[in-house]
Amino acid sequence: MQIIQKYFPDIRECVHDFNISLESLQVDHSKELLYTHAIVEYKKLFLNLLLSTSQEEIENNTKVLVYFTIEHEISYLFLYSELITVVRKLLGKLLEKHDFEYINEINCFFTDHEHRITHLYLQRFLKQLSLKNELRLSHIAIMPDKKFMIHYESHIKWIISLIQYIQKGSFDDKYPELNPTLCEFGKWMHSATTSYLISTSHFKVIEKLHLNLHDLAANIINNCKNKEFLPATLIHLMQRIDYYSLEIGNEIAFLNEIEESAKDPLTHLLTRRLFNKIMLNKLDIAKSTGREFALMMCDLDYFKLVNDTYGHAIGDVVLKHFSNVLEQTLRKSDYIFRFGGEEFIVLLPMTNKEESIMLAQKVCDATALSEVVIENISIKYTVSIGTISVIIDNTIPINQDSIDKYLTQVDEKLYLAKERGRNRVE
């Protein structure tokens, strides 16, 4: 230590040379440090550490510096680069003076500091990261309506289990699921019940972030098991994982908003405003793959008579009842929209003409056999359905005109079903 103390003036000069001139907007009475003000404070702590004169002082000042950087979200890379810059500047000054006597001792001095800082930063960072994720879980737990956040909840639990695996240090085979399609979050993403979300840009972003996150986790686990990991690398990878996780949370929040606006408040089916977007996506797929799909348009027979006889409140019950018939009769992969009033439209992916007529007939039969019972009132009603098969030619442009053309075609089929007596499929 006495040898190093000889170079303290040079170390102080190097640190000051590397200082960034920062003018803080921090007001005196504020208890929270602005980031630039935190950097100024961090510089003092960094210099205190390098000028420590005993092992006890070094240990204590290392802890103070590392805890401060993590608390104020100053990255490990910033701390590490500052340490490297100072030692390079110091060695450069000594080379200019032809002072080679204690080069090895100086190198060891800074290497020891790097080792202590990195190991303590990793421990503290993992602990802080675990606490942050526990806090996120508690926030989700008190949400009145979690919607898709319940799936983000399973993702956060996966992150916590990864942190615990690293903290445990035994590096056995009891690590979280690394296959992005087999973890709970991945299973949800690939489930048929969320098929209408696949057409959104937010869903595609989540998919990419999730794959990146699992790729990072696989590298962490493999390096841990092979005892090849370096604490600095581990810090960097876990910081990236935390970043991807937060981005996934942001995108999930957007999906929640889409879910809120995309669902009809009465029937909880998809709304007309989402139809065009999904239809364009399915037309693109059909054009590139040559696979056909089908459209089904449903209209309740004599529904005005129901409203006039029993009132609009009972009419709403009938609409909800029919929406349940659709959901129970059709497949999970089908997109069901309330198009307006008593009119509904269904997009049937990868379905030919014969299959669409068969499904439509099932809906027609199920509707005719059911009834709505409210107190002493029993209401039976029927539905008329038009269907078309959609086959795209490579030469046909995909735009709003294409959508309007197919809507006109299926509407004409519905009109035909009405003309031919109702309670039927055309």
Image: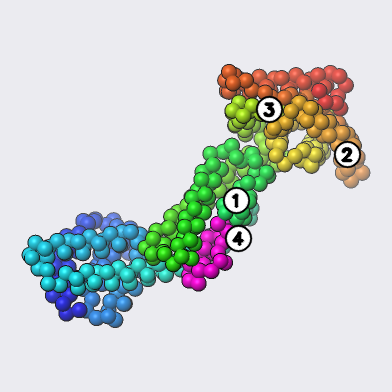
Residue named by callout 4:
141
Give the residues drawn in magenta, as a range.
150-178
Sooner in the amino-acid sequence: mark 4 or mark 1:
4
What residue is shown at x 66% (from left), y 19% (from top)?
405
Q: Quadrant of the C terminus?
A: top right
What residue is shown at x 39% (from left), y 58% (from top)?
236
Q: Is residue 127 left or right of residue 319?
A: left
Q: Secondary structure at mark 4?
A: helix
Sooner in the amino-acid sequence: mark 2 or mark 4:
4
Residue named by callout 1:
181
Q: Is residue 213 left or right of residue 197?
A: left
Between the C-alphas of marks 1 and 2, the distance is: 40 Å
Between the C-alphas of marks 2 and 3, the distance is: 32 Å
What residue is shown at x 53% (from left), y 60% (from top)?
159
Disc 4 crowd rating (10 Å Cα; few below 14, some 14-19, many 20+) is: some
Residue named by callout 2:
370
Disc 3 crowd rating (10 Å Cα; few below 14, some 14-19, many 20+) is: many
Which of the numbered marks, if any, corresponds to residue 196? none
Sooner in the amino-acid sequence: mark 1 or mark 2:
1
Residue named by callout 3:
292
Between the C-alphas of marks 4 and 1, the distance is: 25 Å
Sooner in the amino-acid sequence: mark 3 or mark 1:
1
Q: Does residue 268 appear in the picture of this structure?
A: yes
Main SS class of the magenta portion in the image: helix
Q: Is residue 413 magenta?
A: no
Q: Nearer the viewer, residue 264 or 194?
A: 194
**What's under tag 1, amino acid-wise?**
Thr
The mark closer to the camera, 1 or 2, is 1
